[in-house]
Image (tube, grey):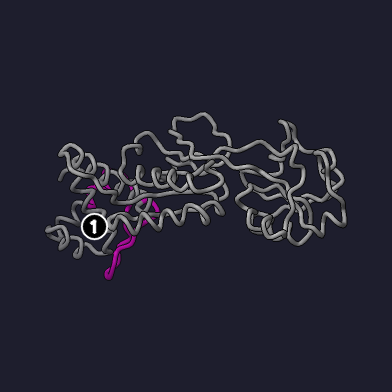
Amino acid sequence: MDRLRTMELFVAVADRGSFTAAARAKRASPQAVTRAVAELEARLGVMLFHRSTRAVSLTTEGAGFLEQARRILADITDAERQLAGTQVEPSGQLHITAPVMFGQIHVAPVVAELIDRYPLLDVRLLLFDRNVRLVDEGIDVAVRIGQLADSSLLAVRIGAVRPVVVASPGYLARFGVPTSPADLAQHRLIFSSGPRSAGEWRFDGRLAPAPRQSLTVNTIASAIVAAEGSVGLANFLHYQVEDAIQAGRLIEVLKPTEPEIMPINLLFASGRSNSPATRAFVDAMKERSHHCSWGR
């Protein structure tokens, strides 16, 4: 049996949890489906399914291979449609990753619009405050904030965001307002772990001095709560605390010496640039950037 047909049958079994159901869906005999999956496992040298008398379930290796198989089959379908000159509607699987808060505020609404517009499109949105390895983790598009490392990935810049140093009115009333980065040595600072850690407190290319006292948390949301609770000064990206600043819960300080502007890019492998689903997401994010402060 040819490899593509074998891959289609494997995906059908994974989707339906049954060799018999997959056989019905693909107009094949249960024996043919069972044999195709066994041949695939032998060729790959791994077990793709756990089998029982009632159902089958994916192994860890099978789950990883499933994502690759879906992508390969979707790419072939797209290529055939393009060669036939037909309008290609985004379909299949689209895996997106973004920083947690940016994803919640700006990416999730875009994904909701795409899901509503394209009924054949399935999206998996993963939000992490860490840099994800696209190829290793099966990601199609990543939203990346900050300077990019050299790589073979393609990048589309959609905007930039301004880091800000903030504190609550209560903290500033108690400890005073810093007027230069050197003053931070006499203050309590709030750090959040992740790509923008304590080492990212840079002013004019220089690291901020070590603080008198510090608190480190592992989420941006926790850092915001701590800052609003007068624990110390904190360094955020403007979109993360825009509402708190407008409401007066946090106040910007050190404006003349703010940290450097950070670009916002969409990253994807060169092989994904022609995918209708990838193009639809990139275009939708570009459109959203026209209406947001970070896009100007």
Query: Mark 1: which amino acid?
Result: Ala
Residue on which the image places disc 1: 12
Q: Is residue 152 above or below residue 296?
A: above
Horizontal and vertical percent position of residue 212: 85, 47
Image spot of residue 128 (x, y percent): 54, 51
What x and y, as percent, mark residue 177?
A: 84, 48
- Which residue corresponds to the image point at 35% horizontal and 37% vertical from the top-left? 273
Taking the spot 83% from the left edge, 54% from the top edge, the residue there is: 172
Determine the secondary structure under disc 1. Answer: helix
Residue 186: image quadrant is top right
5 vs 56: above or below: above
With 179 as the anchor, is 239 left or right in this view? left
Quadrant containing the N terminus is top left
Q: Is residue 257 magenta?
A: no
Q: Position of residue 110 (x, y in %)?
A: 43, 53
Residue 275 vertical placement versus 94 (above, below): above
The range drawn in magenta is 37-61
Determine the residue positioned at 35% across, 57% down: 115
The count of marks equals 1
131 left or right of 77 in image: right
**Foreground: 30 or 96?**
96
**Which residue appears at 38% of the width and 56% of the height?**
113
Are there few (<14), some (14-19), or many (20+) residues within 10 Å of tag 1?
many
Position of the C terminus by quadrant: top right
Q: Is residue 48 magenta?
A: yes
